[in-house]
Amino acid sequence: MRIVVKIGGEVIKTGLENISADTVKLASDNEIIYVHGGAKIVNEISEKLGKKPEFVVSPTGSRSRYTDKETMEIFEMVMAGKANKKVVEALLAKGLKPVGLTGIDGRLIIAERKKVLKVKKDNKIIKIDGGYTGKVDKVDPTLIELLLKNGYIPVIAPIALSYENEPLNIDADRAAANIAGAVKADVLIFLTDVEGVLDKDGKIIGKIPATAVENLREQVGFGMEKKILATSEALQMGVKRVVIASGKIEAPISNALTGERRTVIVNE
């Protein structure tokens, strides 16, 4: 089975021991690809460097990092360096063969730079320069396939290459969805700091048909909304199953595949 696992930044901080131990059990019979986030780690380093993180809100209410040139340099340094290598080192410690990458390497992820952003400010919709933020346009799986064929585990940071050969900040959830689609993954797993998608009473929704995914976007919070959008994109690209589960428990990947406390979204 081919599995793409997206690890959130909070999980990088607290869950890597369990994730890497679980990977040992699964890697002999499955092909595993990791995509990671790390926004909070970027914020921490940025603050220490004297660059206060700036965020903007889209007309639909989505909040995202504003990435000017200096912020992009910090983002690239932290995502490709500190965050990526924490995951790589955890897997190496278990005797595995991880390889840290960004979307720039081998032109793995090409994104279109957003020239202009529409944002809400003081109850008005204004246009600002798009900075160094991008939307994934295509994924070339050649490098990933080469690594998998030779027994390596790709660990991919969410930095893409623009058509102008510039680094771009891309959303990690949507990067994972596009990678899962490009490599024809059997399952895409989002390991996060919650146990799944919750209903209005705070209970985990165990199973959601693909046809109902879009309706969920308005009902969930900002962080989960991005995952629901990414889920919808992955399913449209042919991924058979998407799972949202906790990355802070023992054997988190195994739980996401077969456990009870998780949300499974399936193409039926």
Image (spheres, rainbow, N blue to C red):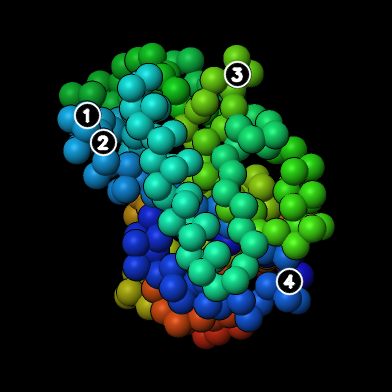
Residue tagged 4: 30
Q: Secondary structure at mark 2?
A: helix
State the separation of the CA atoms marked 4 and 3.
34 Å
State the separation of the CA atoms marked 2 and 4.
37 Å
Question: Which is more N-terminal, label 4 or label 1?
Answer: 4
Q: How many residues crowd around disc 1 within 10 Å: few (fewer than 14), some, or many (20 or more)?
A: some
Q: How many residues crowd around disc 2 within 10 Å: few (fewer than 14), some, or many (20 or more)?
A: some
Query: x and y percent of residue 41 in the render?
Result: 32, 48
Report the residue at 81% width, 57% height from top.
Answer: 149
For this rendering, which residue is in front, 196 or 109? Answer: 109
Q: How many residues crowd around disc 3 within 10 Å: few (fewer than 14), some, or many (20 or more)?
A: few
- Left or right, 175 with respect to 89, comes to right
Q: Secondary structure at mark 3?
A: loop
Please state, as top left, top right, bottom left or bottom right, where the C terminus lies in the image: bottom right
Residue tagged 1: 51
* Callout 3 amino acid: Asn
Report the residue at 34% width, 55% height from top.
Answer: 221
State the separation of the CA atoms marked 3 and 2.
24 Å
Question: Which is more N-terminal, label 3 or label 1?
Answer: 1
State the separation of the CA atoms marked 1 and 2.
5 Å
Above or below residue 136? Residue 33 is below
- Verify CB contact (< 8 Å) between mark 4 and mark 3: no
Q: How many residues crowd around disc 4 within 10 Å: few (fewer than 14), some, or many (20 or more)?
A: few
For this rendering, which residue is in front, 245 or 107? Answer: 107
Query: x and y percent of residue 10 in the render?
Result: 35, 60
Residue tagged 3: 165
Question: Which is more N-terminal, label 2 or label 1?
Answer: 2
Please state, as top left, top right, bottom left or bottom right, where the N terminus lies in the image: bottom right
